[in-house]
Image (cartoon, grey):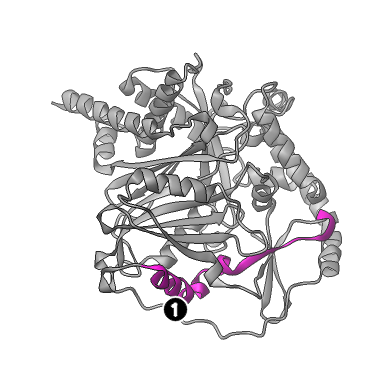
Amino acid sequence: MPESFASAPGQVVRQLTSLDAQFLAIEDARNFTHVGGVAVVDPSTAPGGKLDLADVHDLIEQRLHMLPPFRWKLQGVPLGLDHPYWINDPDFDIEFHVRELALPAPGDDAQLATQVERLFARPLDRSRPLWEVYVIQGLEGGRVALVSKIHHSVLDGVSGAEILGSLYDLEPSGRELPPKPDPDENGGPPSPAGLVARGAIRTPGRVLGAIRHIPKTIPNLDEVAVLRAVPGVATIGRISDRTHLSDHRDPDGHVLERPHGRAPRTSLNGPVSAQRRFSFGSISLDAVKRVKDAYGVKVNDVVVSLSAGALREFLISHDDLPDEPLVSMIPVSVRTEEEMGTYGNKLSAMVVQIPTDEPDPVERLRRANAELSQAKDYFAGLPNDLLVEVNDMIPPVLYARTAKVTTTLGASSRFQPHFNAVISNVPGPPVPLYIAGARLESNYPLSVIMDGVGLNITVLSYRHSLDFGIIGDRDLSPAGFDSLMDTVRSDLAALEQRAATQTG
């Protein structure tokens, strides 16, 4: 759990975990680690049939007490002796964070994507709370888009869903809000000297904690996605297996095989530029479930196989498809019920081969199911906090440099990539949602790319749809990534047709 303390009346100070701090450490002029989404809403259900800047401004302001991270700003520790802290911004100005703009006619999806690309290619201002919301008018059909940006150091996917739950309602009329707490006198942020002293006091405990983690972390270093390219890490994993330091067993006591496969080098895995390309689209969740039932697999297996097919066709079109399967990083939440509402990051990751070498969509689905099943079984035997514990072993004063080195290794042509792409499937609400009375139609997620991983496919379910958000480095495909969504749709249609033939 993140550590908090009160520095003065009204000022609760909360320290970032090592994993939270990692998302700050890897940022530079080209690598941005904010996440967000493009929510497309129908304002006809809202009062007056509109949704504008004032409506969104007022809604967020009324719910700030339900959204603690929206008031947090960074407080660094001098000389980087400890991880930074979140403090309540004494000069918080909501007008800086909520903005409005409009698309020129006709306001189509291509124009919206271009605007999102521009917004996401700008870093967040670290002197203020790390979030922004843009109200974009002028979409076709009178629709409005809400584009959100929030730094990954603030939240992960589960925490993002909690934010969504605070902003959206189940009815156009809204809901009764919990009472605001009594205002306390703000005592101001902690002093730099106090933070240095606190960091010095905590250092011995941090060192002892790192030592305690060694028996669990060293044997599993090869399972940490961002360390896979570091020379020697794979050797440590193999030695650990032979010496039984890492012994993963299923419930019946059988030793589980370590998932196989190393990421081949592709054009997806070099340094990224500062510019982005964004493509988005939706497919029928009902169709995905029909395919899932016909082949006895899971929804996530279908999503991964469709994504693998899209990546396959994209690399073929760029004459860059390797003979070996690509390797994907799949984020996994390890947040417990007790940790709900604490924000920050409680994440781990599976690193899985995906069958990009398979041309047949049905066989690709079967192979994706087999690979994911093996990876899940093996992942279940790993420590839940492996990613946090590995990061905790790095002294804060060396943290930023270490994070940049591991990122650079993954992008260097001299070393094997950590993995080739990120594929994430996040379950969302199955019921209609409303914001300030406007009905949510689609919610396309936006995630992170960085040096070594130039493409990210994130999927969010909502009602009867799976909403895809595909973000990548502009230099990978100046024309964009719409072809990936085209392949996803065509492969889903092929799977449906084959499934109908199979059951007919």
**Residue wearing tag 1:** 178
Left or right: residue 493 versus residue 40 is left
Q: Which residues are magenta?
A: 52-80
Between residue 481 and residue 179, name the one nearer to us: 481
Q: Residue at x 66, y 85 (%)?
A: 185
Please state the horizontal and vertical placement of residue 299, each as a whole percent of the image: 34, 38
Please state the horizontal and vertical placement of residue 199, each as a whole percent of the image: 82, 60
Mark 1 neighbour class, 10 Å CA radius: few under 14, some 14 to 19, many 20 or more: few
Q: Is residue 6 above or below residue 236?
A: below
- Regarding mark 1 in the picture, which secondary structure is present there? loop
Residue 63 is covered by the magenta coloring: yes
Asked whether residue 437 appears in the rendered view, the answer is yes
Q: Residue at x 44, y 17 (%)?
A: 357
Left or right: residue 491 versus residue 121 is left
Left or right: residue 169 versus residue 412 is left
Q: Residue at x 79, y 60 (%)?
A: 77
Between residue 422 and residue 332, name the one nearer to us: 422
User: What kind of residue is marked 1?
Assistant: Pro
Residue 64 is covered by the magenta coloring: yes
